[in-house]
């Protein structure tokens, strides 16, 4: 089988998985982003890469946003939002961060495969995406994938985050031109 055919199989799989997206969960996340004083983001591994891309787009939209752990990340305060991406919802460092978030009175949102995970139980908003991983204990969407490990979830993160960006563009009356004005010019 060719790489081209395998890529088409992945795209077909992801199109099917989009049916599992929950509009109410995503609307709650969109509202929280719009109402946040400052947005923090966090994720580990490949999911963290997807979260980093979303953080970049939120900056392009003009939001006050930073990735946890970056040296320029500010002090948190009430009215802030932390968005965590974690397929299992059980990653140790992210669980510790979620606990600290709750203690500080910062709103917590989780994008995950497991809506019953430790981090989900602490979260104000949980967005459940389909995916397959041996680390997930309570996956709500019983799916299979031709892809290894958490690839399907990570790809769904990227696509869902881009869908959120389009929603936020509409709600803030922005387009690629207004966003590009915030694109890095020192590269």
Image (cartoon, rainbow, N blue to C red):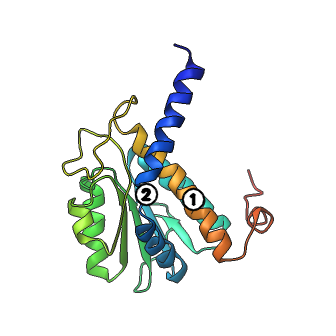
Does 96 sit above or below residue 134? Answer: below
Task: Give the x, y percent position of residue 30.
Answer: 51, 72
120 or 74: nearer the viewer? 120
Q: Callout 2: few (<14), some (14-19), or many (20+) C-alpha neighbours within 10 Å?
A: some
Q: CA distance from mark 1 to mark 2?
A: 11 Å
What is the number of callouts on the image? 2
Residue at 27% x, 60% y: name it: 115
Q: Callout 1: few (<14), some (14-19), or many (20+) C-alpha neighbours within 10 Å?
A: few
Residue at 54% x, 50% y: name it: 159
The kind of secondary structure element at disc 2 is loop
> Is residue 68 visible to us here?
no
Q: Are marks 1 and 2 in contact (CB under 8 Å)?
A: yes
Does 2 sit above or below residue 85? Answer: above
Task: Give the x, y percent position of residue 162.
Answer: 58, 56
Residue at 45% x, 71% y: name it: 29
Q: Residue furthest top?
A: 1
The mark closer to the camera, 1 or 2, is 2
Task: Give the x, y percent position of residue 99.
Answer: 24, 70
Task: Give the x, y percent position of residue 147.
Answer: 40, 30
Residue at 25% x, 50% y: name it: 139
Does 155 sit above or below residue 105? Answer: above
Quarter-of-image position of residue 109: bottom left
84 or 147: nearer the viewer? 147
Say the numbered circle drawn on residue 47: none
Say the numbered circle drawn on residue 163: 1
- Counting residues from the start of the chain, the first of labels 1 and 2 encountered is 2
Say the numbered circle drawn on residue 21: 2
The kind of secondary structure element at disc 1 is helix
> Is residue 32 visible to us here?
yes
Q: Is 174 displayed left or right of 5 in the figure?
A: right
């Amino acid at each position: 089988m060719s790489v081209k055919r395998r890529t088409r199989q992945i795209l077909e799989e992801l199109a099917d998985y989009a049916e599992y997206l929950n509009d109410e969960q995503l609307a709650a996340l969109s509202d929280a982003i719009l109402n946040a004083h400052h947005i923090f983001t966090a994720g580990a591994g490949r999911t963290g890469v997807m979260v980093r891309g979303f953080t970049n787009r939120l900056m392009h939209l003009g939001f006050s946003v930073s990735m946890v752990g970056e040296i320029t990340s500010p002090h948190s305060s009430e009215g802030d939002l932390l968005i965590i991406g974690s397929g299992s919802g059980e990653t140790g460092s992210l669980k510790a961060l979620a606990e600290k978030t709750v203690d500080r009175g910062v709103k917590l949102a989780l994008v995950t495969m497991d809506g019953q995970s430790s981090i989900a139980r602490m979260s104000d908003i949980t967005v459940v995406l389909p995916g397959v991983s041996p680390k997930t204990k309570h996956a709500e969407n019983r799916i299979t994938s031709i892809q290894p490990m958490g690839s399907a979830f990570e790809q769904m993160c990227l696509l869902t985050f881009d869908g959120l960006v389009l929603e936020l563009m509409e709600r803030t009356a922005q387009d690629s031109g207004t966003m590009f004005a915030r694109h890095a010019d020192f590269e």
